[in-house]
Every structure is written in structure tokens, then in C-alpha cells.
Amino acid sequence: MIVCILGTVIFVRHVLKSFLKIMEKPSNLSDSSDDEESNNYKPGNFYVEDQNYNGRLSFDDADKYNIRDSYCSENNYSEQSNYNHSSQSDSDDGSPAPSFQMGKRSINEVTYSESEDEEREKKKKKTDYYQSLATHVNHESVKSDKAKAMMAKMGYKEGEGLGKSSQGRVKPIELSNQRGRRGLGLKLPGLEPATLKWDSSLEVIQVEEIVSWLDSSSLEEINISTLERWPIRGEKQFRMEDFTDYCDLELLTNVLNSKSVFDSLDSEELRRARTRSNPFETIGKGIFQNRAAMKMANMDRVFDFMFTEPTDIDGRPLVKENELLYFADVCAGPGGFSEYVLWRKKWRTKGFGFTLKNENDFKLSDFFSGPVETFEPYYGVKGDGDVFNPDNIDSLKEFVLKQTDNLGVHFMMADGGFSVDGQENIQEILSKQLYLCQCLVALHIVRTGGHFVCKLFDIFSPFSVGIVFLMYRSFRNISIHKPNTSRPANSERYIICKWKRHDCDDIAQYLFNINKLLWNISVTSKEDITHIVPDEVLMADKVFYDYILHSNNSLGERQVVNLIKIQAFCRDTNLYESKQAEIRKQCLAYWKVPDRVRRADSRVPEEVCEQILKKSGKNFLTSLGEILTSMGDLEKSITSIYDWHAIPMGNKNECNFFIGLGRNRVFRLATGGKYWTKVDVKVELSPGSLVYAELVNEIIGEGKSQRKLTAFHIVDAVTLGEEDISNFHYTKRLTLCKLYSKALEKCNISDQCKVRVKDVYGLEIVRDVFKGLSVKMMKSGIQELVFQMESCAFQLKGLMFFNATKDPWRRHLGRSTGLHYYYSTKSKESKFDKDRPDDACASVMECIEKRRLWWWEQGVGLLGEEPREGTLHKNQLSEFIRKSCM
């Protein structure tokens, strides 16, 4: 063994020595290799630059050029050679001549050869140089023969490996083709050059996608007795190759094989290839927190905004003028789908979220684009958000119906999924119960005429096809669609269900029963439910069967093409998709999504207020209302009682302006209007909301069991979630404020301050306020006057009066018709309430600037006391109203 090692060392030493001597320069050249490398200079290899030539001059180019100094002599090189270009012009015609500075001498001129002597001299020097190299090579060859002789004496035989047993490597080590983090010499079947040929003509890229619908409107309902005969039990299946009844066998094999190619590939290398190959990849997440939000934007537009602007079968809006758009987002953490809907609809939508709690929860703090204040997460009666649990499903149904007037949501979204690393080919089998539960929840909480969208993966198994069939029989139309934002090489697709039928309750109950069976089957059990609809039923509906077959085959072909594309991009890192930038621009424009950078709102209250009031000015923010103290004040202020509205107040210090910056970032304008201070109660307002309101202590119960809760009472609003409502009539502003407060309501969160809108009374019926007063025993033992609103009770401190009619208009009551109308003192024209002119509506600024206040102090007559000087008595107000109505 020692002899073998010694022989190896000697052999390697001689080989290296021979190599180094071969690479030595002739004695007339500098031996400073560092200088040569740093100066980009090598013997016999010059860089020459003039007007006619810009390239490399070697000995082979010497026939073209004559250099007027000896360039192979020892004097041309020093130990510190420099390489310079000179811009100085030394030629006769004034053109720049190159200058090569080499030690103390330079080459000042390059001309074409004209002398035969010079030509012979040049060739001789070339010959001498090559001979000197040959001498070194021959010399080393002799040494190499000696080394071979020594190795032979030690037992080495040519063609065999080194070592006692000739176990050493014989063949030379191949040139490394290592890529990324692959091991040296690793070859991945399917990713070798011979198997990769990418043909771009195979790929179809369309910004405006084609939708294919399947219609079931003419089919009869399926009753529960029929459904209960359909389930088929069997052993659990884990071979996708067995599911060939609803797709082409060869295509299924190609899909599975194409996926398997990437099993051994480094994840980072795969990600980079996928990013470069997907023409829609750079669309990314845009202004949203993740790509899922952009998928929803994509699908919403492709399906004519059927989710954010839903219509009924006749094309009429499904959401009426003064209604909220209700939606549910199930299995949806971190909430990209919801963020898109909230961004599109702002505060005019109310969302309910259901997802696994904790690590898979909604990331509400990342909802930069959509106002999260009108979105309420819920985790079921078990508190974990597990959609498989039947008890959670029941409680979710109850929770949603309670807040939607027992009608259900207008649409539901489901985007559930989980990691299947290493098991991508059986993702459909692993996801079967997830498919089932998302669909059955939709049938329980979507209202009649509503919509549903749900993520699926492969639909090859009879169980999955059965779910699609039952959704097909529960909605008037369904579509299986893969949007552009879904990466083309994966199995992801979506089922879009349009217009829920009224006769699908039995199907909903059937799916719920199936889930209860699956819930009770042990994970380790070999038993399973393999069919929820028999194959003969699925195939008997030829329209449905052909649709599923065509959908699976077309999406499968598209997937195989893009898997091949990724393989090609993995192998060749120089490939890239050149259309990405243009496609991104076209898609965002088509989907009506702004192409801008995502960022958090970091504005301060002063900045937001300035933006809201840039047209109207801010003077009204600090205006002081006029206090009514006598009958004379009433007669002076009020021309027509039908213009005025009475608002019960719970604080004598008047109202304040509040501005919302999102979530609990709510600020109150300080007295004098010089700065904003953050409120110290837990209340939420949508970003850009500027409201006129007061914080009131609401009373629950009497005596020692009495409780007080702080509530936020809105009197008026300038903007609601950046929507300007300031110029609407006061009654319309109040209607919108009530809709806004309903959207903000979160019945599942007990410690949050309630947002309410004041009950407002026309001045002609102000007596109704007095009727709502009652005496209650407070916790302190003192009796106080309490005003009972529709939803709460609080101590009343006075009334605020708003004039909702703008000069020169006045509102009156027609004696003959009994209808209210508007009369212009300027143009003398009249308009009924239903035709109220826009210029007759006083803005919120005008209402606040002209407001009147009546504070209830001793002597107002509420407890039957006599009038006091300087105080407006209740009887005086009643008498004024009576006379005005005559």
C-alpha cells in the first residue's frame, strides 16, 4: 500500500511539473504572470485599436500588420509592464494611432507590410517562438517516459486503475454539468437535453378568457329518498391510475408522469423555472396581500363581475339600493379573496370569514387595500375553524343566517387547500372531504339566486365527479374554469356556480349526512365512501358526462404542455417568457385593477381631513350651534317646521367630529379644532370616514343590576369610508349611516363599542320624543329620565335641531293632498318629495353650521315644573308647533 501511494505521489508530481514547464514563457519574455494577467496581455496576443481594426492581434494576423519595433526582444518587456491606449494622433492623416506602452519602449505606429525583409524577419521570429515551445514539450515528454518506467516497476499497468487491486478510476472525470443544488453527476430523467423540446405554438395565451357553462335549469329536483340510495362504500383508494372513467387514460398517464419528473428537483430551481416560464407570473399579488386576491379579481372580471355586482336571472341587481352585499369566505386564511371583495365594494359589503384558527388564520393586519372593519371572522362552536366538524358547520349556518335576515349571503368563496409535499399525484384523493365540506356549507348559507366559487384540483375520481354533479343539480349554471392567474402547470381549477336553485335543500342535507359518515370514519380505517353518486347516474346524464370529460381532457392537455415548458426552462436557464410585462399590463387593465405598488396607509388625521375637505373648507368643524332659550328664538330661527329634524342627545357638551384611519385608529377633533386625539374606547371606523357623533353611556337594566356600555352614536357624516355623502339630503345620509353601522356590527365580538345611528324625528312630531321618556332607578339609587331608542336606552340631555332644506327652498305640507312638497321662494316652483330637487338639500356642512340646541335644564317642564326665565319650556315648543301646523 505504501509503495502504491508513493508511486502515485511521484507520478502526480512529475505530471504537474511537466505541465508547468510547458506553460513557461521563453526566456526573452517576462516571467511576471501576475502582470500579464492584470494587463490583459499574453505573449503573441496583442490588442490593437485604430480606425480600421478593433480586435485581437495574434501571430496569425502578422501578415496584415507591420510593427516597427521588435516586439519579441527582451527590451520590450520589463518586470512591470503597462498596457495603455493613447488618444494622441501621430499619423499623417490625423487619425488616432494606437500606442502600447511596454516598459520604456512603445509601439507608435501600425502600417500594412510593404517590405519582404520585414516579412521574413517576422516569420522567423514566429518560427523561433514555436520551436522554443516544442523544445519544452519534448523535454517534458522524456521526463514523462521516465515516470512511466518507474510506475511500471511498481506494478502499474496501462489501462488499469491505481491501487493494490487496480481499484482506482480509469476513465477521466467528466466535465461537470451540475445545476443549482443538484448533486455532482446527478441526472434527472425527463430533464436531459434529448428529451426536452419546447414548442411555443402549443401554448395558447388569452387575456380575455373563454367561459363554458353547464345548464341544469330544466332538470327536476332530486329528493332525499333517492339520494340516500346512492352512497357506495369500499376500500380507500390511493392510485390515481385507476380513475379513467372521466378522462382519457393516456392523458392521465402523461399528467402523472409529467408531475413525477420534478420529484427529485430542487425546489428553488423549480420555482425559478416556473417563474420564468409562466406568462402571467409577474402579475403577482399587485396591491393585495397575496396572489389569491388577484385570482379573485381575475375570476370576477371573467364572469362579468357576477360576485361583486351580482344580478338575478333577469339581469336585475341582486343587491338593492339600500342593502349590503353579503359574502362568506370559507377555508380562506389568510384572506386574499376577502381583501379583493372589500377593496372593490369598500364598506358597502359585509363579510363572514371561516378558517382554521392560529397559524392558518386571517391576517387582517395585512388587508392594506380592503377595509377590514366590515369583515367578521368566525370559528364555529368548537372555536377551531375546522370545516370538517359537523357541529361547526351547524353553528356557522346559524351565525350567518342570523345576520342576514335569515336569507343567507349573496355569494360564498372557498379556497381551501393544504400541503401535499411528495403526494402531489394523489392531491385529489386527499382533498375529497375538503371538496365536500366547502360545497355543503355553500348550500346551507348561500341565499336562493346566489353564487358560489370553490377551488378544486383534479376531478378524476367518481367521488369528486359526484360532488360536481350535485352542485350542477343545485345551481342553474356551473362552470369548471382555470383562470389565467392559476399557474398553468398545476392541477388547480375552480367550480363557479351561478344562481342557486330553490329546490336543493335535500342535496344540502344529503351532503351533510355524508360528511358525518366521513367524520366518524377513523383515519387508519381502510373503509371509505368511494361514490356519493353512482357511475351509472353520472354517465346517464350525457350532457354532464361530456362536459366533465371535455373539461378534464382540455385542462389536462394544458397542464402537460406547461409541465413540459417548465422542464425545458429547468434545463435551459437562458429561456424566458418575453411577454410577461405586456401581459401583466393588459390583464390588470382588463380586470380593472390599478397597477401600483402595495403599501400600508400611513396617513395622519390632519392629512386625511385635509383631503376630505379640500373643496368645502373646514370652517364648519369649529362652528358653535345657537342655543334656544325662548319662544322668540324659535320664531326667529324656524320658518317652516317641516324643514327641521329633532335629534335626541346624550351629552350636554355637544357632539364631536371623529375621523377613521382603519381598524381602531379613530381620532376625535379637540375643542377649538386645532388637533386630533385618539379615542380611548374600542371602536372601529373604515379609513376615510369623517362623522359627526357622540359617545353615549347606554343603560341596561335597573337598580343594582344595572350596567352601562359606551356606544358610538352617529348624528351625521361627511364621508363614509372615503365615499362622499355630504351633499345628499339629511334623511338619505342617515339611511346610509344606518347601512354603514350595520356593516360595522360584529355580534361575535362583545368588547367592541357599538356603532349606532340616532333616531331622528321631524319637528312636527317631536312629541314622540317626549312619549319615549321614562323614569328609571339608577344603580346609585337616584331616579333619572331615560330615553328609549329602538335598540338602546340612555339619559337624555336635550335636543339638537337640523334644518335639512337649503335656501331658497322651503318644505311644506299640502292641505288638500296631505303630501309634503318643496317650494322655491325665488323661482316660485313646487316639487313633491319624490321629485325633490338636488339644490333643495342642505349639505352636512350647512346643517351643522345652522344647527339649534335645546338643553334640558331645570324649568323645561319635563317633570311638570313651571317655566323659568331664560329657559325654553316644553309647552312653548308644543304651542309653536301646533300653530305652525295650522
Image: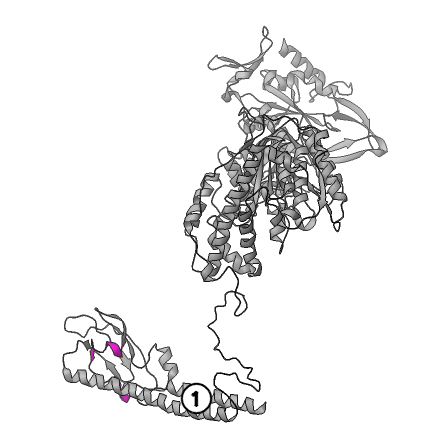
Instruction: Check the image and report above or below for 75 versus 419.
Output: below
Q: Is residue 133 left or right of residue 539?
A: left
Is residue 65 within the magenta segment? yes
Q: Residue 530: image x %, image y %?
A: 69, 43
Instruction: Check the image and report above or below for 688 versus 91.
Output: above
- In-front residue for pair 685/698: 685
Q: Name the kind of residue labelled 1 in the image.
A: Lys
Q: How is the image coloured?
A: one colour
Residue located 58% across and 91% down the image: 2
Q: Residues within 10 Å of mark 1 (few under 14, many from 20)?
A: some
Residue numbers of the magenta segment = 58-75
Is residue 246 within the magenta segment? no
User: How many numbered callouts?
Assistant: 1
- In-front residue for pair 817/380: 380
Residue located 66% across and 19% down the image: 630
User: Which residue is label 1 attached to?
Assistant: 17
Q: Residue 173: image x %, image y %?
A: 48, 76
Residue located 65% across and 16% down the image: 764
Kindly tell me whether residue 701 is visible in this rendering.
Answer: yes
Q: Residue 636: image x %, image y %?
A: 59, 18
